[in-house]
Image (cartoon, coloured by chain):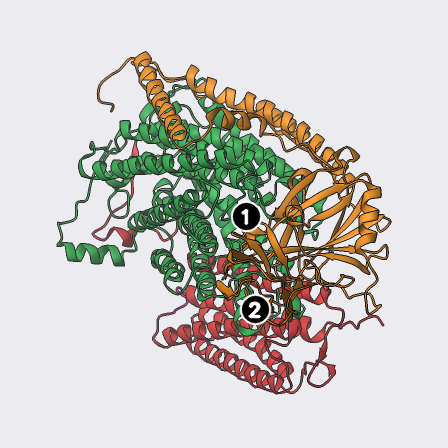
Chain colours: A red, B orange, C green
Amino acid sequence: MALTTETHPVPTDHNPLASMPHDTHGGISNPVLGMLLFITSEVMFFGGLFAAYFNLRANAPQWPPINPETNEVFQLAILPFVGPATLLLILSSVTCQVAVWGIRRDDRTAFLRAMAVTVILGIIFLVMQLIDYSLLGSEGLTLSSGSYGTTYYTLTGFHGAHVFGGVVMLSVVLYRGMAGQFSGRHYDAVEAASLYWHFVDVVWILLFSLLYLLPGKTAAT
Amino acid sequence: MSSSPRSRTSQTAIFAVAVGAAIIGLSLVLVGLGVNLLDAGHIFVTGLFPPVAVTTEGAQIRDLYTIVFLIAAAIFIVVEGLIIWTVIRYRRKPGDDTLPPQTHGNNIAELIWTIVPTVLVIFMFVISWQTLSAVDKSSDEAQTKIRAVAGQFQWTFDYLAPDGKTILYTEFIPLASAGGGMNVPAGRTVQLSLVSNDVIHAFYVPQFLFKRDVVPGRVNQFDFTVNESDVGQTFRGQCAELCGSGHAIMLFEVTAMSAAEFDTWLAGKAQPAPSGEPAASGPAPSGQPAPSGQPAPSGQPAPGAGETLQVTAQGVKFNESALTATAETPFRIDFKNEDPGTPHNVAIHQGSPTGQEVFKGEIFPGVAEKTYDVPALPAGAYAFVCTVHPNMTGTLTVQ
Amino acid sequence: MATTTLTPAASASRSALYAWLTTTDHKKIGIMYLINSFFFFFFAGILALFVRTELAQPGLQFVTDQTYNELFTMHGTIMIFLFVIPILAGFGNYVVPLQIGAPDMAFPRINALSFWMLPLGGILLLLGFVTGGTAAAGWTGYPPLTEDYPLASTGTGQDLWIVALILIGTSSILGAINFLVTIFKMRAPGMTLFRMPILVWTVIVTSVLVLMATPVITSALIMLFIDRNYGGSFFDPRVGGDPILYQNVFWFYSHPAVYVMILPAMGMVSEILPVFSRKPLFGYKAFIFATAAIGALGFSVWAHHMFTTGAVYLPFFSIMTFLIAVPTGVKMFNWIFTMWRGQLMLKTPILFAIGFLMMFLIGGINGAFSASVPVDFAVHDTYWVVAHLHYVLFGGSVFGIMGGLYYWFPKMTGRMMNETIGKAQFVLMFIGFNMTFFPMHELGLAGMPRRIADYSSTAGWNDLNMVATIGGFTIALSMALLLWNIFISLRSGEPAGDDPWEANTLEWATSSPPPDYNFDRLPEIRSERPLFDLRHGRTAEH
């Protein structure tokens, strides 16, 4: 190409912004990239909480420690609430992805149905978590029950807050979907929200494994 | 762009005059405020080195500092010099609009100024690591073991038996000038343990060129050996980790005795505890003789005949600011220490808190209560203070 | 070349205010960031003057020790979170879309939200002054001093501090997301990654640091809040918690934060030096790699703030800290050799850039002392560290910010700042700054700890403290000159035109100030200096 000093006019219109490209480089859309970056920051947030958990656990002579109220080791029950809730959350990720596939192929009905199911599953997860909290509270495990209680409620509590945020986000997507704002060519918000929902699910799987499945340790006599 | 064209020389001259005027003006302000400029200038230059170390570990740190300083000074002179020289040499001459050579870079240069600094920093790391291994250690074989207990807002020193647990003597007064301080044997390795009663503090003696945090929930330890040549000297120290409103007053002093003197002194202090059991860790005043500071009154009205004053210490403050007592009559002070784990006492000084001490009550940690029998005092103005916390004061009027 | 200005019709002042309050235009938002940040800069500067006034002589003359602790805590907190970090985001906001030829940021409404969280966070923080006392545990806020202990920092002020910082941190994170999406997705045709101005690169690395580190301090602050208010056991050793845990989580953010505070300022210096030397930046690619290396290494050194805790693996953090000096040195040499054999036009922007080089060098050198663990045992938590941090943050970031202000003020306002006042400000600031902070090296070595309201009159620290205080007031005087310059330049500064500096990058290819959506037409982009190429028809020696 010859070297010139010509300028290349950017096409203008009555409304300059309308004809400016949203992005001049292909690939994933701006909202999806933004959401991926946001999820990165959320991963680091949970990272800080996980680091605290590992640190306190390593320092403690016994884990789980003894519950001063019952004089027995603290126990977290997987049944009847947390285990099934976990399965439902995993299922909700599947239905969420089904919704995304639906709108990608312009099948609005499939999209709306799957998204509605996802929202309902999310709400059920939250309700089951809250019931489980009140049971644990009555057994003597609270935020102020030493490092065990503090880390348990902080980790699961902030996860629950993120689930709540995700439910709100998906509800907005559902509402906008019902108002006809999405199509097979325009569904960025759906994709972005679904990425967030998958992230929330993955965090739960990690949390659940850490808090409920990882073997404890007893103090050396 | 600029208003009137000036020659480069006159621009420089104006600049220099402006800078000179600013410096002279500021110097005059300083002199007016009483700053000894010559002294300050002297410290400016010599103060770029830490104090001469009084421990063998500190001396090694100072040697390391010297090497780092020399490298730093060299880098400073070369690079700052390069900046200043470049700015002066390549100033645009007025009227000269030619474009200079548009050099984009030089890979060899990049390589050089990547590799040379890397070698330099690795060298500095290695010598630092060597010094670290020599100075940062703690061995249970140390002959003398002391525990410094930091609290809000004072230092307490427990002298421990060789088992590292039994407390032989507890010194509540952190300053040597107030009759206390931490005594150490010169020429002998001392193992110092650090515990905190509350928040994070830091044990810092500038002449050791060393500090270590005092963290609640853990015990930090380090060894030091004061040079024999520094026998008889006292070194100042203070807390170096923000610990609340009293952070600035958490001072202490370390006094170096000869090893023999130290052993004698400690043996004299470490009398067997009345109950015969070694105290648990912490500043419990075990092994202390009966309340100090007053001979048994003879030929005077029996103690307890006079009034009883109430004094309470709370939040490292006295609740009372002014007391009165009757002259020529012994009286009592009913002293409540409401600060858990914090040692306090009531002492009476003539005239002002820094006046002659005429009575010193036993120092004890809270929460506890003791009654002091104060001998008769002539009429006059006195001050009552806490020997451990010199900022805790009040007035005592005896009339 | 074409200069078009879209002049909006004159509007009533009420709707002009409304326009500013509801704007999503990155240029207006950038200016609001600058105004908000400068307000907090002067506020925190006055707090510093109180600190220096108290310390000028031994004895507590003016404030109680508790109040003193509040003063330096708020000074540090405001300077870091409400001045340096946001003002650099503000410059980025204004300049980056222009430099890459974009019409705005990727998410304009989130951009506005990011800004407005700042005055809100600032108000929350300052409310401590009227609720019985602000936070008083240092900008670092270590527990157990910040736990619910008897003589600790228990008041509402400390909780307000926590909430304000969480809000401000969130603002930062949203801004970082915006910058990254904008830069990666909205560059003009021809603007490849390796033709972007260095400032844009530094904003990329800074944004990655903000994105990944800030959430970690959010988690630390939340854990502290739970300990203080809900009986939590994260950091309270009485109930199984660990104070050192806080320090680790806190510094994992706060060390990368210092690179957040310096990298954009380095980017600005990298814009100014080539323009005023009339040569390209020396070693453009090396610069980018060095910046990325600093960003990456910056995550590996956090525990060098904890060498004296006895709870840290010392050799690792020491070697990594030493290694960070290498890419920093690479940049220093690249800057110097940008000026070398150039044609230096010594106007105010480059004076501040040169001041940056000279002062940041000292900050880097005294940092190397602290990297050596045994030396750190002597100087940690003393005035040596106060000297170091001010040489890099003031001598570095603030000098860079001043350079950026003088450089881009014409673009933002259409008017030049006064050169004579600018030079006077520079001289006074340079002298005042060194007078304040150089003596602190000696004070620290002589044993004066940080964060003390008062000191013993027999320790030998009296004269140097007085010198430092006078230096502080000299800095204040230089700031008065700055305010005066801004005021008169806004009213009657010389009209700037599109490109008063004969600069290299795209923001100078449009009017001053630029129209809405920034450009009517863009020059061809074939290198990192599109305007230089345009001006010289690419026939200049390459």
Q: Secondary structure at mark 2?
A: helix
Mark 1 falls within which chain? Answer: C
Q: Earlier in the sequence, mark 1 or mark 2?
A: 2
| Residue C472 pos. (x, y %) | 40, 38
Q: Which residue is mark 1?
A: C256
Mark 2 falls within which chain? Answer: C
Residue interval drawn in magenta: A182-186
Q: For residue B336, what is the image quadrant? A: bottom right
| Residue C347 pos. (x, y %) | 33, 26
- Real-space Cα separation, disc 1 to disc 2, in angstroms: 25 Å
In the rendered image, residue A2 lying in the magenta stretch gets the answer no
Question: The C terminus of chain C lies in which quarter of the figure?
Answer: top left
Q: Secondary structure at mark 1?
A: helix
| Residue C297 pos. (x, y %) | 60, 43
- Amino acid type of disc 1? Pro
Q: Is residue B45 above or below residue C477?
A: above
